[in-house]
Amino acid sequence: MNINPGFILFLAFFLIFGGMMLYRVLKFGGFRAAMFGAPIERTVGEAAGANSRMGRFTVKVHRLGGGADKAVGLELVAKTFASYQMMPVTLSAAEAQKLAQLLQSAATGAASTGQPR
């Protein structure tokens, strides 16, 4: 029987990667929590973007149990006719407060107190 070394290497890589992902899913309590790298304590809410012909977009806000460095998780979701894409963003408490201030400034038209231009 002739065993291809490339196949063995591919199989080993696949099993190691799959094992690491399974470990993270079990450690943090779910696939989304594994993507954030911290357990999700609760989902605070979500905001839908303006619907367009390209698809629907939402932002879900999660409270994470990852300490001060991983306090807030933003789940950016884009849905179209034939696809679903989720992008996790993890923020510290300070970064989340800064983002809230920037969003408030943008919504009200006030001067930004964020980074200089």
Image (cartoon, rainbow, N blue to C red):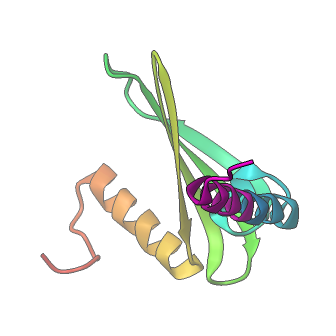
Name the one closer to the observer, 19 or 109.
Answer: 19
- Across and down, in percent, residue 68 comes to 66, 84
Q: In this view, does 57 lie above or below 36?
A: above
Q: From the viewer's perspective, is 117 left or right of 2?
A: left
Q: Along the line of sight, which residue is nearer the eye, 14 or 92?
A: 14
Q: Where is residue 15 in the image (x, y as percent from the top left)?
A: 74, 58
Q: Is residue 5 left or right of residue 42?
A: left
The residue positioned 69% from the left and 62% from the top of the image is: 12
15 and 82: which one is in front?
15
Which residue appears at 31% of the width and 61% of the height? 105
- Between 14 and 94, the residue placed more toward the observer is 14
Residue 70, by quadrant, is bottom right
In terms of image quadrants, where is residue 50?
A: top left
95 relative to 116 in the view: left or right: right
Locate residue 101, reporting x and y percent: 40, 68
Question: What stretch of residues is rendered in magenta?
Answer: 1-17
Q: Which residue lies furthest to the left in this view?
A: 117
Can you tell which quarter of the image residue 100 is in?
bottom left
Question: Residue lying furthest front in this view?
Answer: 1
Image quadrant holding the C terminus, namely bottom left
Principal secondary structure, stretch drawn in magenta: helix
Above or below, 7 relative to 114:
above
- Residue at horizontal 66 percent and vertical 73 percent from the top: 71
x and y percentages locating residue 77 in the rendered image: 51, 39
Q: How many marks?
A: 0
Is 38 included in the stretch rendered in magenta?
A: no
